[in-house]
Amino acid sequence: MSMVQVSEKGIFGAGETEFGGSYVSEELQQALDKLDAAFTHYRDDEAFEREFHYYLREYVGRPNPLYFAERLTRELGGAKIYLKREDLNHTGAHKINNTVGQVLLAKRMNAKRIIAETGAGQHGVATATVCAMFNIPCTIYMGEVDTKRQALNVFRMRMLGAEVIAAKSGNRTLKEAVDEALMDYAANYEDTFYLLGSAVGPHPYPLMVRHFQSVIGREAKAQCLEKEGRLPDLITACVGGGSNAIGLFYPFVDDEGVRIVGVEPAGKGLDSGVHAAPLCTGKPDIIHGFKCYVMEDAENCHSIAAGLDYPGVGPEHSYYKAIGRADYVPVGDEEALQAFLHLSKTEGIIPALESSHAVAYAMQAAPRMSPDQIIIVSLSGRGDKDVAQVYDMLRAREGELQEA
Ligand SMILES: *Cc1c(COP(=O)(O)O)cnc(C)c1O
């Protein structure tokens, strides 16, 4: 029996360790029940599974390599570091695994349109991509402030044929985009599919996203057994909502000898309050329709990596923390930036700033381990999208140095 206890309603654990579930309006619950019934049916359907794997192979480019980072390993002088190369997927990150899975489910449910919300735009682009490929109309909600900050991603989504709607209420960022998308969904769920981008939200989303992202961990496990003849000692991934992390972790969760470490963005430091690390500092609470660890001061939510900037976290990570199956550690903006630069120089791989958090942790852990031990890092995405941001930050520093 698996050590992960989860009910049919998506409730992980019980009592003190209870997370997940569904806390939404009656209309939304109807929509979620219909989605849950479809997911429960198709997750075990052979034809569905075959089609999913067809597109993962032919469109996404899977399996991607489990790459031995030889120079980085040698330089650190400890455990062997392997990188699971989600950055080599079509569109450059793990998000496409989940959007392909959900769009196939939407087709099976005869949805006429797909909606999604996006913060920095990465999930919006991944959604618009699969909607273009499957020829389904697509509407993306994005806070008006974010549409200005990420104008190029808005253009990308429009190029892919999506309609982008700027949410103009409140702070005009992700929260307002979520509110408007949920209103649309509650009103139109008969023919509309809400495509969620991470392992968060009310049931069945966390289990569904885990299902589609678990291909990461299943591949990594088989590849590690093939290359090394044994399981890794440590697996690690960055945690925003937690989808690339749960995708890597879940297939290893019952392997007791495998240590699991999730890396949360500590931003400007846990003490500063300016971070996005609910598992390291938060308390159990309800956010966006489900129970999880939530940051005390969500208004200060920040990370150098826009994709990690979320005040809550997936319920399954909350549960792993509560039962002690995984550890969650903080890595700040500056350490992530240094790992971004270092991996680029030593391996010729420019990682996403999100992924750089996990790389930074692996660089701390490896020298404390022995050369016959193995670490697997989820390299969730490529860093091309972050190059301009890093350029501006380093230039501003040079400016500071010259003035000083
Ligand atoms: C969106 C994103 C993340 C964070 O999302 P999770 O659901 O926590 O995986 C991490 N890395 C990259 C490259 C992303 O685009």
Image: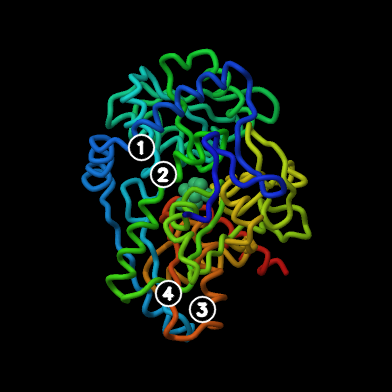
Q: Which corner quadrant of the image does residue 35 belong to? A: top left
Residue tagged 1: 43
Q: Are marks 2 and 3 in contact (CB under 8 Å)?
A: no
| Residue 306 appears anywhere in the view | no
The answer for how far apart the CA atoms under marks 1 and 2 are is 8 Å
Say whether disc 2 or disc 3 marks the residue closer to the N-terminus.
2
Residue 267 percent coordinates (x, y): 66, 57
Residue kind at label 3, given as amino acid type:
Ala
Instruction: Name the element at disc 2.
Output: helix
Kindly report which numbered mark, 4 or 1, lies closer to the viewer in this rendering.
Answer: 1
User: Does mark 2's beta carbon lie closer than 8 Å to ligand 1?
Assistant: no
Q: Tell whether 88 sits left or right of 150.
A: left
Kindly report which numbered mark, 4 or 2, lies closer to the viewer in this rendering.
Answer: 2
* Observer-nearest of 218 and 5: 5
Q: Are marks 1 and 2 in contact (CB under 8 Å)?
A: yes
| Residue 136 appears anywhere in the view | yes
- Residue 366 numbered tag: 3
Residue tagged 2: 211
The residue drawn where x is 69% and y is 58% is: 280
Quadrant of the image containing the C terminus: bottom right
The answer for how far apart the CA atoms under marks 4 and 2 are is 26 Å
- Number of marks: 4
* Observer-nearest of 335 and 104: 104
- Residue 315 numbered tag: none
Kindly report which numbered mark, 3 or 1, lies closer to the viewer in this rendering.
Answer: 1
Residue kind at label 1, given as amino acid type:
Arg
Q: Are marks 3 and 4 in contact (CB under 8 Å)?
A: yes
Kindly report which numbered mark, 1 or 2, lies closer to the viewer in this rendering.
Answer: 1
Q: Which corner quadrant of the image does residue 287 belong to? A: top right
Residue 180's place in the image compared with 15, above or below, is above
Residue tagged 4: 81
Residue kind at label 2, given as amino acid type:
His
